[in-house]
Amino acid sequence: QVQLVESGGGLVQAGGSLRLSCAASGRTFSEYAMAWFRQGKEREFVGAISPNGGSTYYRDSVKGRFTISRDNAENTVYLQMNRLKAEDTAVYYCAAARHISADYAMDYWGKGTLVTVSS
């Protein structure tokens, strides 16, 4: 069982930055791939990181602006968001899965944190 708690959301001006954190419970965090999703008009995949942090991938609209990292010693995954745009406004969720499938079915979800980007 893995419990996930996101933090770090808030209001930021367009062009600004925010860093989201997702703290995980349990001693098996390092066995899970972690992903970030967001819910605006619809839920969409933002990016993911492999269990050891060696691989990351992102949706095209955030490539070069967002960076996912993890600290397995601290059971935490991060989403650094730079050059934010109004269209990045959403509730951001972290999620965990032992293997991320093509349909992005995840095993565990956090409750989300709201990011609002003012233009």
Image (tube, helix red, strand yellow):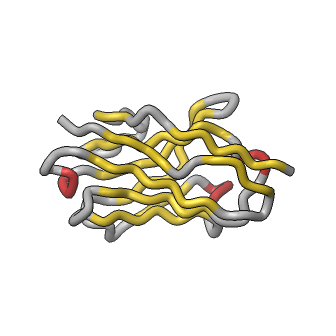
Residue 80 lies in quadrant = bottom right
Residue 76 lies in quadrant = bottom left
- Report whether 106 appears left or right of 12: left
Q: Residue furthest top?
A: 41
Residue at 60% x, 34% y is 39
Please state, as top left, top right, bottom left or bottom right, where the N terminus lies in the image: top left
Residue 31 position, x and y percent, is 18, 53
Residue 88 position, x and y percent, is 70, 48
Residue at 29% x, 42% y is 97
Residue at 37% x, 57% y is 77
Residue 15 lies in quadrant = bottom right
- Report whether 19 appears left or right of 21: right
Q: How many marks?
A: 0
- Report whether 77 appears left or right of 74: right
Q: Nearer the viewer, residue 119 or 46?
A: 119
Residue at 63% x, 69% y is 64
Q: Nearer the viewer, residue 51 or 19?
A: 19
When the figure is inspected, residue 69 is found, relative to residue 58, above or below; the finding is below
Residue 103 position, x and y percent, is 43, 35
Residue 74 position, x and y percent, is 26, 62
Q: Residue furthest right?
A: 119
When the figure is inspected, residue 66 is found, relative to residue 90, above or below; the finding is below
